[in-house]
Structures are given as structure tokens and as C-alpha cells.
Amino acid sequence: MRRHRIETDVAVIGAGSAGLAARAAASRAGARTLLIESGPYGTSCARVGCMPSKLLVAAARAAQQVREAGRFGLRASLEVDGAAVLARVRRERDRFVRAVIEGVRRIPERERLDGRARFVGPTTLEVDGATRVEARGVVIATGSTPALPGPLRPLGTRVLTSDTIFELERLPGSLAVLGAGATGLELGQALHRLGTRVRIFERADALGGLRDPEVRRSAHETLAAELPIQLETRTEIAVGGGGLIVRWEARDSHGEEAFERVLAATGRRPALADLDLAASGLELDEHGRPDVDPETLQCGTLPIFLAGDATGDRPVLHEAADEGRRAGRNAASYPEVERSPRLAPLFVVFSEPQIATVGAAASEIDGAAVGEASYADQGRARVDGRNAGLVRLCARREDRVLAGADLFGPDVEHAAHWLAWAVQERCRPSNLLTLPFYHPVVEEGIRTALRDLCKQLDGNVDDDEPRECRPGS
Ligand SMILES: Cc1cc2nc3c(=O)[nH]c(=O)nc-3n(C[C@H](O)[C@H](O)[C@H](O)COP(=O)(O)OP(=O)(O)OC[C@H]3O[C@@H](n4cnc5c(N)ncnc54)[C@H](O)[C@@H]3O)c2cc1C
């Protein structure tokens, strides 16, 4: 077979959110670039991740609002057309995918290559065995794939992952969800609200990435009042009952239940296995992963950079885009490599109420000060009939700077953003309290937590601050 040979400055493997950002940054820095993609264009975020999952959550939220209309004195009845719900998810999802593909098409054709890349030298790649790419630097942005536990593999198409669930033509009658992380909670609760019988099983004492045990307890209590969510539960799954039988065992109970399908929401693994990374000369750990400097994204001392889900760290879209930009810039400027501080950690789970974590966990800080507020009686949350949740914020005592937050409550996605900005800008809770809070909004609940945090830090807080108008205050 005749081999083609391409020379470039920066080769980017993977045209997902990280890879596209890396290519654009390297190109802006004046480098010749080559973007290599083995699968369909459109990014995991648009095709199987953020967007279809939020579309399903949006449909479920609409259904729930109809179901709960009675609490406002309204009479409404609900009929879920599952096929139509899934058709809308795919229709809107396809629009997002098309928009990404249009962007990719604007990249000159000579700067794109379709095929699977693998290393044959430190910065030499072979693509589909047919093209040799010689680059000065390489960005690996190959994303991640669902981690399917071994015992589930023989069960075939009855086992769904986030890669396959949005292709269903109808909603499953029943679904066992394995994993109570972001994917398990979002999809599990959404399908429950759309009429599927759902039970969520989680092996660890873990829920939506929450680190604070009090907030986790509050979240578990509220979410499990709506649908069964079993933590610290082991499962065994076998074919039977016209579908799958899940046998489960928790600390003080056990049982078995038949389900039509299982959703494996058991995490994702960096997609590095096919790259033949050993041929690059990088040192690899026992999982075949190289050591990455999180401030430069460089692997070891070679001109190889890693970005996005492929790093195995903070697998969310804004991190993928930020890492892609930094990796692309550094690959273009190598051997000069710029260090840049990481973003403040920010994660959101689109359950209802929502879950969010920001910055550091209190348990990571010596003698952290912690302030909290409950949403059980919070003014605006009560107005909307969504009064459940708990937020806990933490600060370091030595510099009195806000360090992190674990949030469970209505629409905490918004507060989580400005709390992350405050953590990154090293703001003090006392300064945040001098900023405007409109009334009545759910963010006033965060103000209550900030006031409590100031009390823990300083022993008092200026009590002339306007109070939230809520029952009992
Ligand atoms: C169900 C779900 C919901 C999510 N919801 C959210 C959310 O609400 N908010 C959020 O911020 N994040 C969310 N995420 C995470 C987010 O989607 C990812 O963090 C992000 O898409 C990762 O982008 P990436 O560029 O690293 O990977 P991808 O977009 O997966 O790109 C990797 C690309 O590399 C290609 N590739 C792999 N190997 C090779 C090779 N050898 N040669 C050539 N090409 C290769 C792949 O085909 C792929 O196109 C969600 C994820 C899932 C699964």
C-alpha cells in the first residue's frame, strides 16, 4: 500500500470540544495544524452528552410541572407520548450536532484527516495505517468512553449506556440505573418522571459527586422520596423475567426486581487504549496513562499534550474547552510552554433539585470554617413550591477566603457559577455580603449561608443586613 506523508506543526487527535479548541488555539498562534478524527463529527457533548441529556431533563421537568400543578390550585392531567419525547430529543440534538459540523467544515480540508491515529514515534502518527503524520507537537484529545463493568458485557443490547439510550424509539417500561453520579441521577430521574419504573443502585456512599456528608444526606432524603435510590448496594444482574433480573444487597436489606433494561452509568474511561502511547516514548502508569502537568497539559517532557476527558480529570465541557485552548497554544509554542492556573472546579448535576460542587471540599482544608443554609423554608423556594435542599460553604481560616461549596437546592446551577468565580478570584465571604442580592430570589439562601460562614470565621456578622422575608423571620 502506498503511504501518504503529511508534515504539520501541531497534530490534534480528536475533533471533540477539546480538540476543536486546541486546533483553533494552535492555528491562532500561527501553527500549521492537522485535525484527525476517527468517528463522526459533532462532539460527544452535542451527540451523546450534555445536550441530549438536558433535552430529556427538560421534557421531564415539563411533565413534573404538570404533575405538581395541583399544589397551586390548578387541575391538569398528563399523558406522556414517549416516542414524541424521544423524537424531540433527537431532533434538537441533531440541530446542535449540525451546528458543530458546519463549524468543522469551515476548517480547510487539507487541515483535516479522517481516520484512527496511533503513535509510531514521539511526534509521528500513523492514521488508519495509510498516512504518516510528522508533527512538531501533538495534542491528544480523544475523549472518554462509558466504562461498562465486565459482568454486564454478555447482556447485550438490554444494557444501555449514555451512548445508546438516546437512540431508543420508545421509553423503557422499567429501568435499573447503575450509578448515582451525574449521568445516573439526571437520566434516572428524568425517565422516572416520564413514566418509566426506575430504581437507582449505587455501590458507594456517593451521590452526584457531593463531598459534604450533610448535603449528601439531604440530597439523598429528598431525591429518594421521589424514586428509589439505593446507596452502598451491590448488584448482580442476569437475564430472566422477559428482561433482566437485578439481585441487590445493601447493608441492612436485600431484594430482587425485574427490569426491561439496565442503564450503566458507572463512569467513563479516558480513550487512550487505541493510541499505542508506548510508542511515543512516554512513561505510562499501570492504567496506560501518562503523567500530565495540569498547568501546562504537557505529558512528561515531550511535545505531547493531553486535553479534555482524555486526561481522566474533571470530565466536563468547559474544562475540555479550556484545556484544549491551553494545550493547543503550548503545542504551537513548544519548547516554550506557558503555565496557567486551573479554573476553580465547578460541577453541576441537572437533577431536581439540582446538585453542584464548587472549589475545594471542606474535608480538604485544615480546620475549615463551614456556613450553611437550608432551603426548607427559603422565601422564593417556598413561593415556587420547591423548598427543599441544603447548601454548605467553606472558607480557610488563615486568609478567610471562600474555598468551596456543596449545594443541593432549586436552580443552584446559577449560584454555583458566581461562587466558583468568587473562589477563583479569592473573595472573602464578608466582601460577597456587600454585593447586591435581589429579592425574592433563591440566591438569598446563599446569602444566609455566607452570613453563617462569616459568623463561624469572625464570631459575629453585621446584623443590619436586610433579612430575607420568609415565614417565621
Ligand atoms: C450523558 C452525559 C452528559 C453530560 N452532561 C454534561 C453537562 O451537562 N455539562 C458538562 O459540562 N459536561 C457534560 N458531559 C461531559 C462532556 O460531554 C465531556 O466532558 C466533553 O464532551 C468531553 O469533550 P472531549 O473533547 O474531551 O471529548 P469528545 O467530544 O468525546 O471528543 C473526542 C473525539 O476523539 C475522537 N477519537 C478518539 N480516539 C481517536 C483516535 N485514535 N484517532 C482519531 N480520533 C479519535 C472521538 O471519535 C471523538 O470524536 C456529559 C457527558 C455525558 C456522557
Image (tube, rainbow, N blue to C red):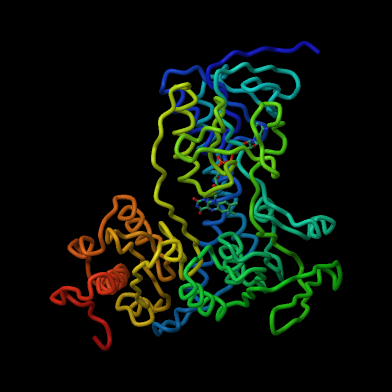
Residue for point 85% across, 56% down: 154
Residue for point 53% across, 21% down: 10
Q: Classify the position of ligand 1 by quadrant: top left, top right, bottom left or bottom right.
A: top right
Q: Quadrant of the C terminus?
A: bottom left
Q: Position of residue 346 (x, y in %)?
A: 43, 54
Q: Quadrant of the N terminus?
A: top right
Considering every residue shown, the one lying at the far bottom of the view is: 472
Image vertical order of residue 191 relative to residue 70, above or below: above
Decide which of 223, 428 is in the foreground and name it. 428
Residue for point 60% across, 77% down: 227
Image vertical order of residue 315 relative to residue 106, above or below: below
Q: Position of residue 138 (x, y in %)?
A: 57, 26
Image vertical order of residue 312 relative to residue 365, above or below: above
Q: Position of residue 136 (x, y in %)?
A: 55, 18
Decide which of 186, 138 is in the foreground and name it. 138
Q: Is residue 208 left or right of residue 241?
A: left
User: For residue 456, which quarter of the picture?
Assistant: bottom left
Q: Position of residue 221 (x, y in %)?
A: 52, 80
Considering every residue shown, the one lying at the far left of the view is: 464
Decide which of 402, 56 is in the foreground and name it. 402
